[in-house]
Image (cartoon, rainbow, N blue to C red):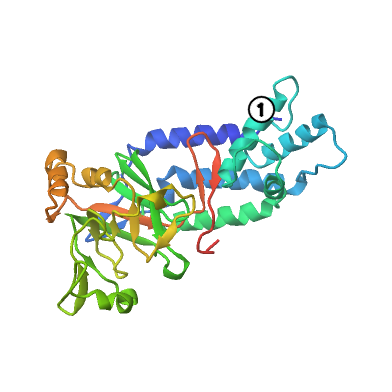
């Protein structure tokens, strides 16, 4: 039996992505973007609905995996069937010499999608994830579909940050141009969901110490680059300034910004919820060049950083930024990725 979700979904996703660039059905009203519905123009929404319908069909006859009393052939057949039910294979059964290699390849994709080591082996954690009821995934999909339906539509050019995946994507003409790792707020200082517009980029910025930690750093006033300015504790630009060398500003009630970081090693970690709420981005100069395209050339911008000049530059037009919380993402090949529910939102 062919996995109609898998085949149909790949077609839907690719077709939607190819036509997405031609659509810009939104109206700008002040700083607010409004439209009939984000769902009507974003392929992720259609993709999630397609996957949801497939899971609902599979939920009534789930295959469970067990290592006991099975030879390799029987076990591979069982795993193959389960991977089909989870949307990672196009057929529900396999015959021939390629079955084992197909199963292992699909199992690696499944492990990667669930944040497990993609070993292709039936580890205890893998079996646990394979045996989780599909109804759990159905509830997760419904939550994410609801989030898309509440989200405002993306314009053709924007920056998108997904908190659970710890990633930033930049789009131009609805096509992905940049993908970079980010660091988000720790559990006690959660990064909020925000829709705003990047209205300036600052090189070699000063850091205004947040009130929540000012008490801990008050003793530094007058040394190590810290000083009191207008009642606030401020750290001057430096190599160890927490904002790094670049800051992106956008209006929001939470005083959240996006910036560089001197702690580059943290970007290599899989789990990256370490900040006080602001977004730290790896390779911020790439994002700055994207935001400031047509405003300043790359050489001049790099010169400001190199010579430690503090400059605030406004883009030709403010660039929309979306900070969202999506725990499921489906790639252009129709394969879902499930991200860790960092903040316990579902």
Outermost residue, front side: 223
Determine whether the residue tagged by mark 1 lies in a helix, strand or loop.
Answer: helix
- Find residue 187 and report its horizontal and vertical position in percent: 47, 66
Q: In the displayed structure, would residue 47 be above or below residue 146?
A: above
Furthest toward the top, the residue is 97
Q: Residue at x 72, y 33 (%)?
A: 92
Q: Residue at x 42, y 45 (%)?
A: 42
Image quadrant of residue 280?
bottom left
The residue located at (25%, 60%) in the rendering is: 241
In the image, is 295 to the left or to the right of 217? left
Q: Residues within 10 Å of mark 1 (few under 14, many from 20)?
A: some
Q: Is residue 206 left or right of residue 163?
A: left
Say which quadrant the C terminus sits in: bottom right
The residue furthest right is 69
Query: Which of the two residues, 30 or 278, is positioned nearer the viewer here?
Result: 278
Q: Is residue 295 visible?
A: no
* Position of residue 78 measured from the top left corner of the image (x, y, whole percent): 77, 37
Q: Is residue 217 above or below residue 308?
A: below
Query: In the drawing, does residue 96 fall left or right of residue 252?
Result: right
Residue 47 showing in the rendered view: yes
Percent from the top left, x then y, of residue 14?
46, 33
What residue does disc 1 label? 102
| Residue closer to the observer: 145 or 343 | 343
Observer-nearest of 10 and 273: 273
Q: State the residue in front, 13 or 86.
A: 86
Residue 268, given in percent of the width and then of the height, sits at 43, 47
Which quarter of the image is occupied by the N terminus? top right
């Amino acid at each position: 039996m062919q996995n109609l979700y898998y085949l149909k979904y790949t077609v839907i996703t690719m077709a939607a992505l190819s036509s997405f660039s031609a659509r810009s059905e939104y109206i700008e009203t002040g700083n607010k973007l409004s439209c009939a519905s984000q769902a009507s123009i974003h392929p992720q929404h259609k993709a999630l609905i397609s996957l949801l319908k497939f899971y609902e069909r599979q939920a009534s006859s789930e295959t469970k995996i067990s290592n006991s009393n099975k030879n390799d052939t029987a076990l591979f057949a069982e795993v193959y069937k389960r991977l089909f039910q989870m949307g990672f294979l196009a057929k529900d059964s396999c015959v021939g010499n390629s079955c084992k290699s197909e199963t292992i390849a699909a199992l690696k994709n499944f492990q990667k999608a669930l944040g497990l080591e993609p070993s292709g082996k039936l580890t205890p954690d893998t079996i646990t994830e394979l045996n989780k009821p599909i109804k759990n995934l159905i509830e997760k999909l419904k939550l994410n579909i609801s989030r898309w339906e509440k989200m405002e539509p993306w314009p053709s050019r924007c920056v998108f940050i997904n908190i659970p995946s710890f990633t930033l994507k930049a789009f131009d003409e609805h096509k992905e141009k940049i993908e970079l790792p980010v660091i988000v707020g720790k559990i006690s200082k959660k990064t909020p969901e925000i829709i705003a517009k990047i209205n300036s980029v600052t090189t070699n910025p000063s850091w205004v110490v947040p009130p929540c930690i000012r008490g801990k750093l008050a003793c530094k006033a007058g040394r190590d680059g810290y000083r009191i300015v207008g009642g606030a504790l401020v750290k001057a630009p430096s190599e160890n300034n927490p904002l790094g060398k670049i800051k992106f500003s956008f209006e929001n009630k939470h005083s959240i910004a996006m910036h560089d970081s001197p702690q580059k090693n943290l970007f290599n970690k899989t789990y990256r919820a370490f900040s006080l709420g602001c977004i730290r981005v790896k390779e911020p100069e790439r994002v700055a060049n994207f935001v400031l395209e047509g405003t300043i050339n790359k050489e001049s911008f790099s010169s400001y950083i190199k010579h430690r000049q503090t400059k605030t530059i406004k883009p030709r037009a403010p660039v929309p930024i979306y900070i969202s919380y999506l725990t499921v993402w489906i790639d252009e090949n129709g394969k879902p990725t499930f991200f860790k529910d960092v903040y316990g939102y579902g």
